[in-house]
C-alpha cells in the first residue's frame, strides 16, 4: 500500500471558525432512528404515551456491536414507526414531542469506574459513537486485548466548511483532558498523540496547553491537506505505522478517537449525561448565516436551518457532513443523528456536477489516492462484472474519501462506483459461497 505524502488541496471555507456558538432550545418533535451507528439496531424500551426526560434511556443496545439511545428532550413518546434514513434503509424510529421544559432525568449520575471492564461498560452506556462522522460504537475500539502503544486524538478536521471539532478543541479541552486521564488510568497506553492540521493555530495552542499537563501527551502538527483526518492516513502520519487491508488500528498498536468523541466521554464520566446533543456546523453557499449550533439529537434539519436564519438562495442540495465524504439528504425532514457534525446547504450552481464523459486514462485518480489504489482498473473490473478482480485492485482499502473523483477531468462518480462495487463484491462472494 503506497501512501501519498501530499494528499490533495481542497478549499477550506471555514466560515464558522471562531464564531459564537448558539444553543437551540426547542418545543419540537424529535425523531430518533434506531440506527445512528455502525452495527445492529438499538432496541426500544419505551412505548407510546411514556413520559421521558433529557437523558432517559429509550432504546438499549442490540446484540453484537450496537449502541444505546437516550431522549434528547423532555416530553411524551408519540410512538415508534418506520422511517427511511439517508442511505435508503427503512428502520424503526422513536418520536418524542418536546414539552419545552428541558427536564433532566433524575436518575442521571456519574458512572462508577474502577477497572477496564467498568470503563468499557461506561463508554458503551454513554451512547457515544464516532462523532467525526463514522458512527462506530466507541466502546468497541477500547475493548481490545491487543497491546496499545498510541491513543491518537483526531483533531484534523480536514473537510471544507466543518468547524464543530474546532469548537470542541477551543471550548471543551478540559473535558477532553478528563477523558484522557480516565482512559490512561485503566488502559495501558504508552503515548497519546493529538493530530491536528497546521492551519488551526489557536486550536494548536489550546491542545499544546492540554498536553503540557501530562507527559504522555504530545501534539503532532500535520499538513493542512485532505484526507489527513482519515483513520489510516492519520495513523501513518502520526506514527509511521501502516494499517494493511482488512486490519484495524489496534492491529498496529493504535486506537484513534475523534476529539469531540473524547470530550463527550469526558462529560459523561463527570456527570453521567449520555450523548443527547451535538454541535453542528451549519454552512454552505445557500445558508444565510453560517454558524455552529448545539442541537438536540433527533431534531429535523429543517428546524435547524430555520433557527440559523434560513437560506439566501434556492437550495440545490443538502448534505450530512462535509462535501467530500458527506451524504446527500433526501428530505429536510431528516433528523440530526449522533454522527452528524455538519449540515451543508448548497445553492443550485454548487450542487451541479459537470457532465460525465468517458475515462481518458489520465491517471489523476491514481495519483490523488492516498493509498495508491488502481482506480482505473478497479472501475473497469466493476463495469465488466469481473468481481473477482476488485480486491486485487484495492477495493478493500478504499475509504471513499473522494480524492479520486475530486480532480477527475471526466467528472466520473468514482466514489459512488466504489460503493456499488463493494455491494456487488459482497453479493458475489455470498453467491459463490452458496454455489
Image: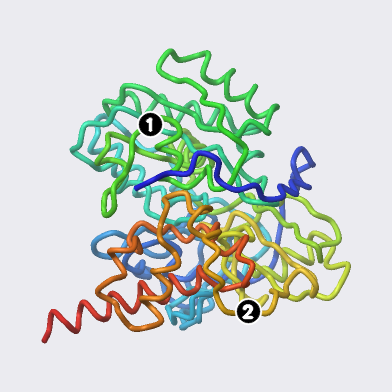
Mark 1 or mark 2, which is nearer the start of the sequence? 1
What is the x, y in percent for residue 53? Answer: 53, 58
Residue 167 sits in which quadrant?
top right
The front one of 210 and 269 is: 210
Query: Left or right: 277 with respect to 100?
Result: left
Q: Residue at x 47, y 33 (%)?
A: 270
Instruction: Report the coloring of the rendering.
Output: rainbow
Examine the rendered structure and indicate whether residue 201 appears above or below residue 396.
above
Q: Quadrant of the C terminus?
A: bottom left
Name the residue at the bottom extreme.
435
**Closer to the camera in the image, 180 or 98:** 180
Q: Which residue is label 1 attached to?
A: 240
Foreground disc of the pair 2, 1: 2
Q: Quadrant of residue 123?
A: top left
* Rendered location of residue 311, percent (x, y): 84, 68
* Helix, strand or loop for disc 2: loop
Instruction: Name the residue carrying label 2.
Output: 356
Q: In whole angstroms, how far apart are the C-alphas of marks 2 and 1?
A: 38 Å
Q: Nearer the viewer, residue 290 or 336?
A: 290
Amino acid at each position: 500500500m503506497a501512501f501519498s505524502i501530499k494528499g490533495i488541496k481542497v478549499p477550506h471555507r471555514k466560515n464558522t471558525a471562531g464564531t459564537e456558538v448558539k444553543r437551540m432550545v426547542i418545543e419540537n418533535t424529535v425523531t430518533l432512528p434506531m440506527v445512528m451507528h455502525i452495527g445492529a439496531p438499538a432496541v426500544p424500551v419505551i412505548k407510546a404515551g411514556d413520559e421521558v426526560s433529557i437523558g432517559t434511556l429509550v432504546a438499549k443496545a442490540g446484540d453484537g456491536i450496537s449502541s444505546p439511545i437516550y431522549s434528547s428532550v423532555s416530553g411524551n413518546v408519540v410512538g415508534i414507526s418506520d422511517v427511511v434514513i439517508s442511505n435508503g434503509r427503512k428502520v424503526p424510529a422513536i418520536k418524542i414531542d418536546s414539552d419545552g421544559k428541558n427536564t433532566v432525568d433524575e436518575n442521571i449520575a456519574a458512572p462508577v469506574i474502577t477497572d477496564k471492564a467498568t470503563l468499557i461498560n461506561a463508554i458503551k452506556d454513554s451512547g457515544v459513537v464516532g462523532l467525526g462522522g463514522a458512527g462506530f460504537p466507541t466502546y468497541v475500539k477500547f475493548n481490545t486485548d491487543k497491546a496499545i502503544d498510541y491513543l491518537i486524538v483526531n483533531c484534523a478536521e480536514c473537510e471544507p466548511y466543518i468547524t464543530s471539532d474546532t469548537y470542541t478543541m477551543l471550548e471543551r479541552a478540559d473535558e477532553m483532558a478528563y477523558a484522557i486521564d480516565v482512559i490512561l488510568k485503566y488502559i495501558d497506553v504508552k503515548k497519546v498523540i493529538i493530530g491536528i492540521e497546521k492551519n488551526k493555530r489557536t486550536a494548536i495552542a489550546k491542545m499544546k496547553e492540554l498536553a503540557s499537563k501530562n507527559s504522555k501527551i504530545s501534539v503532532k502538527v500535520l499538513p493542512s491537506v485532505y484526507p489527513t483526518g482519515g483513520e489510516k492516513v492519520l495513523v501513518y502520519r502520526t506514527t509511521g505505522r501502516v494499517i494493511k487491508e482488512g486490519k484495524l488500528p489496534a492491529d498496529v498498536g493504535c486506537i484513534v478517537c475523534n476529539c469531540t468523541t473524547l470530550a463527550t466521554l469526558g462529560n459523561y464520566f463527570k456527570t453521567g449525561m449520555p450523548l443527547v446533543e451535538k454541535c453542528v456546523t451549519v454552512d454552505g453557499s445557500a445558508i444565510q448565516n453560517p454558524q455552529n449550533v448545539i442541537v438536540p439529537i433527533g431534531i429535523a434539519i429543517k428546524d435547524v436551518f430555520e433557527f440559523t436564519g434560513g437560506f439566501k438562495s434556492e437550495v440545490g442540495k443538502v448534505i450530512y457532513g462535509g462535501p467530500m465524504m458527506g451524504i446527500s439528504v433526501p428530505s429536510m425532514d431528516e433528523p440530526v443523528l449522533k454522527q452528524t457534525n455538519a449540515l451543508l446547504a448548497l445553492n443550485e450552481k454548487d450542487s451541479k456536477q459537470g457532465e460525465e464523459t468517458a475515462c481518458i486514462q489520465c491517471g489523476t485518480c491514481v495519483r490523488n489516492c492516498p493509498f495508491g489504489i488502481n482506480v482505473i482498473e478497479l472501475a473497469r473490473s466493476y463495469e465488466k462484472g469481473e468481481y473477482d478482480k476488485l480486491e486485487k485492485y484495492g477495493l478493500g482499502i478504499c475509504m471513499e474519501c473522494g480524492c479520486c473523483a475530486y480532480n477527475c477531468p471526466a467528472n466520473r462518480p468514482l466514489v459512488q462506483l466504489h460503493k456499488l462495487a463493494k455491494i456487488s463484491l459482497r453479493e458475489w462472494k455470498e453467491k459463490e459461497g452458496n454455489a
